[in-house]
Image (cartoon, rainbow, N blue to C red):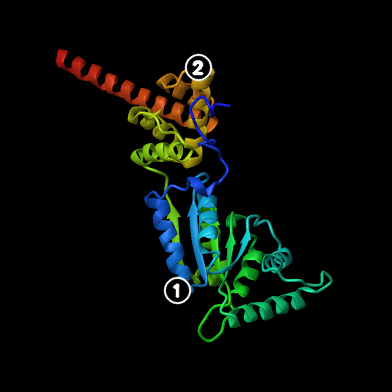
């Protein structure tokens, strides 16, 4: 594609959550600090929420890579699980060899015993669940019961939930108030500021091997920031399309026209851009009408 054209070693704006491109901006750095601190303190439930595309899965994988040497980690990327499927998934992630004909009570007991064995071997167990807003009421309750497992001093398993804002709405329901009260640490990921978007774009290009004068000037970065609303996924999509446009025209620099074309070709950004256009238009019309009325009154 455009790798050799821009002297890149890999794609800089892929949507795959590659931890090599992790950019420790303020929101993600703070979130990582909250997570590592809470895990070190042995808290039962920890929660991170954020809008679609703000980098929750990348953060989850970064945490997974960072703690796997010190913790026994179970990772569930799919949360569309019934209570029964949750128990089996945890058993598989823990590396347990269990008889598939076991009933749920026997399976739970075996998991409990295995967690106790790990605790006796000084193994601390962490369960990471991505897309946690999709957990059903019954599965959330089954998850809460797992965190009841503890010795006099330690939890046998810690749970980190990553989810969209709908997770907060679900946890606000009285059905899961017992679980909600056990969430001792939480963090809400925000979108990037304009200056963070500019830094983020250049960071990803540098990681991908780009070592020439910036492809995206600050002015162009601001256009990307406004159109993407600071959402990392949308920044990646726009920048990828911009580079494709420049490459297709044989240009080794990015222009405002490339950005406008990328925005027009990206549904979420195009809709937001159009809304802003009409908002500015209405504001201009309102100012014009007020000015005309003021002039008219002066003539009366």
Instruction: Please tell me the numbered disc located at residue 41.
Output: 1
Q: Position of residue 126 (x, y in %)?
A: 57, 68
| Residue annotated with mark 2 | 250
Quarter of the picture holding the C terminus:
top left
Residue 187 in view here: yes
Quarter of the picture holding the N terminus:
top right
- Nearest to the eye among marks 1 and 2: give it: 2
Q: In this image, 58 relative to 82: left or right?
A: left
Q: Position of residue 41 (x, y in %)?
A: 45, 73
| Residue at 84% across, 71% down | 101
| Residue at 81% across, 72% down | 99
Q: Is residue 250 above or below residue 68?
A: above
What is the crowding at mark 2: few (fewer than 14 residues within 10 Å), some, or many (at least 20)? Answer: few
| Residue at 40% across, 54% down | 29
Number of marks present in the image shown: 2
Task: Identify the image quadrant of residue 2.
Answer: top right
Q: In this image, 256 relative to 130: left or right?
A: left
Q: Is residue 49 above or below residue 287?
A: below
Q: Secondary structure at mark 1?
A: loop
| Residue at 33% across, 28% down | 219
Q: Position of residue 121 (x, y in %)?
A: 59, 80
Residue 173 in view here: no
Residue closer to the observer: 100 or 168 = 100
Q: Secondary structure at mark 2?
A: loop
Q: Is residue 244 above or below residue 140?
A: above
């Amino acid at each position: 594609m455009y790798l050799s054209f821009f002297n890149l070693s890999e794609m800089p704006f892929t949507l795959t959550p590659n931890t090599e491109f992790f950019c420790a901006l303020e929101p993600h750095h703070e979130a990582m600090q909250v997570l590592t601190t809470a895990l070190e303190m042995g808290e039962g439930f920890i929660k991170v929420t954020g809008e679609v595309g703000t980098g929750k899965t990348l953060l989850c994988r970064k945490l997974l890579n960072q703690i796997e040497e010190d913790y026994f980690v179970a990772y569930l990327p799919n949360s569309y699980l019934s209570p029964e499927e949750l128990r089996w998934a945890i058993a598989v992630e823990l590396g347990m060899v269990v008889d598939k004909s076991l009933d749920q009570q026997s399976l739970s007991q075996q998991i409990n015993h295995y967690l106790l064995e790990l605790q006796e071997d000084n193994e601390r167990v962490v369960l990471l669940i991505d897309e946690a807003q999709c957990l059903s009421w019954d599965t959330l309750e089954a998850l809460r019961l797992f965190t009841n497992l503890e010795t006099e001093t330690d939890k046998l398993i810690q749970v980190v939930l990553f989810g969209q804002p709908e997770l907060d709405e679900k946890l606000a329901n009285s059905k899961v108030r017992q679980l909600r009260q056990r969430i001792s640490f939480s963090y809400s990921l925000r979108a990037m500021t304009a200056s963070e978007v500019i830094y983020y774009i250049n960071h990803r290009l540098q990681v991908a091997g780009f070592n020439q004068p910036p492809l995206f000037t600050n002015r162009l970065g601001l256009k990307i920031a406004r159109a993407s609303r600071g959402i990392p996924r949308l920044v990646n999509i726009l920048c990828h399309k911009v580079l494709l446009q420049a490459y297709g025209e044989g240009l080794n620099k990015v222009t405002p026209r490339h950005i406008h074309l990328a925005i027009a070709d990206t549904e979420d950004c195009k809709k937001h851009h159009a809304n802003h256009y009409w908002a500015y238009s209405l504001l201009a019309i309102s100012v014009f009408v007020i000015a005309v009325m003021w002039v008219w009154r002066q003539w009366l």
